[in-house]
Amino acid sequence: MKSKMELMFRPLLFHLLLYCATQTSGVIIQTVPPSNSEGIIETQLDKTVSLVCQPDGSHEADEELLWLRNGAAVRLTEENKMGRSSVCVTPVLYEDNGATFTCRLRKNATAMASVTLNVSYPPQLSGSEEVSVEEQSMLVLLCDIWANPSVSSVSWSLNGSAVDLLAGGFSVTNDGFTSTLTADRVEESLHEGTYQCTAVSPIYGTHSRQFIVTLTEKTLKIPLMPFVAGLVVVFFTALLAFASRWSRIRKWCK
Ligand SMILES: *[C@@H]1O[C@H](CO)[C@@H](O)[C@H](O)[C@H]1NC(C)=O
Ligand SMILES: *[C@@H]1O[C@H](CO)[C@@H](O)[C@H](O)[C@H]1NC(C)=O
Ligand SMILES: *[C@@H]1O[C@H](CO)[C@@H](O)[C@H](O)[C@H]1NC(C)=O
């Protein structure tokens, strides 16, 4: 009987403790849109998030409040400090993803509460770009696939069908931010055409960007380095000539 009572009371006790823990944090933050139980606010690029902080019942109602964004103080006007303080994040930017906003009492750092923004955004892929590349040189195409949540897949096509990595000597790399398609030595028959990179986002659907690649004839490269070196020599010769004349001029003046 006793053990049964314990079993019944344990969850209740746990909930009471949890209740007390959240109640005695000292301040409460109310947000639009509302945060989830972990203090995360789901939002999107260009939206507005508003945060309002107040001391909870355990403190004086007119205490001075502070806001921190990722640990750095947020500048507040005088009227926005005592008893109630609000912060508006508008428009929401990429940099706000993962940003933690903390409100606390100025006099008591343990009286604090935090919320964190989770900013979702699609990959920035659209439009079309013309790329011209010299025969026998390297082709590099870049696609910005950075998104939240991360894209679930990225693919490259040439003239509408999947890029044949082996036949074209292509390689594809993906570091989570950029997907890069490269071909070392381009040939007209293999590499000219319309490329497209396509990224699929679990919430925003398909995004893609086109590259219209044309090859140009190989031109003779003018060696630039000896030319520059020649210029430098001319410059220093002139400087030396001037310097020696200058010392002579100075001597005359004495
Ligand atoms: C600071 O705030 C915490 C949380 O509300 C509270 O438990 C503590 O007693 C306060 N300390 C002082 C010195 O007021
Ligand atoms: C942020 O939001 C995305 C998309 O809604 C979700 O997949 C991800 O788990 C969230 N991250 C956190 C830390 O809540
Ligand atoms: C892609 O299509 C263009 C235009 O039809 C064509 O000139 C080019 O050779 C094609 N590229 C490949 C690799 O088949």
Image: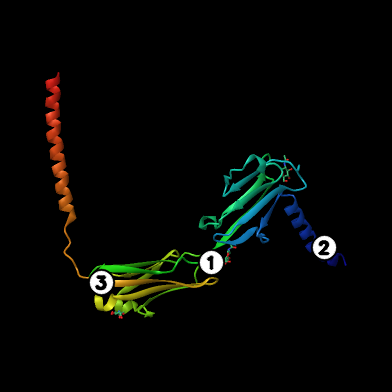
Q: Quadrant of residue 129?
A: bottom left
Q: Nearer the viewer, residue 60 or 128?
A: 128
Q: Quadrant of residue 134?
A: bottom left
| Looking at the image, residue 242 lies above or below residue 77 | above
Q: Nearer the viewer, residue 99 or 131?
A: 131
Give percent across and percent down for residue 198: 43, 73
The quarter of the image holding the N terminus is bottom right
- Residue at point 67%, 51% (across, down): 52
Q: Earlier in the sequence, mark 3 or mark 2?
A: 2
Tell whether label 2 touches label 3 (CB within 8 Å).
Answer: no
Disc 1 within 8 angstroms of ligand 2 (CB):
yes
Rate crowding at label 1 as few (under 14), some (14 to 19) or many (20 or more) other CA atoms within 10 Å.
some
3D distance between C-alphas at marks 3 and 2: 77 Å
Would you name the residue on which mark 3 appears? 215
**Left of 249 or right of it: where is 11?**
right
Amino acid carrying label 1: it is Pro
Mark 1: secondary structure: loop
Amino acid carrying label 3: it is Leu
Would you name the residue on which mark 2 appears? 9
| Looking at the image, residue 70 lies above or below residue 218 | above
**Image region (quadrant) for ligand 3:** bottom left
Give percent across and percent down for residue 49: 61, 56
Would you name the residue on which mark 1 appears? 149
Q: Nearer the viewer, residue 217 or 27?
A: 217
Tell whether label 2 touches label 1 (CB within 8 Å).
Answer: no
Give percent across and percent down for residue 28: 71, 51
- Residue at point 12%, 30% (across, down): 244
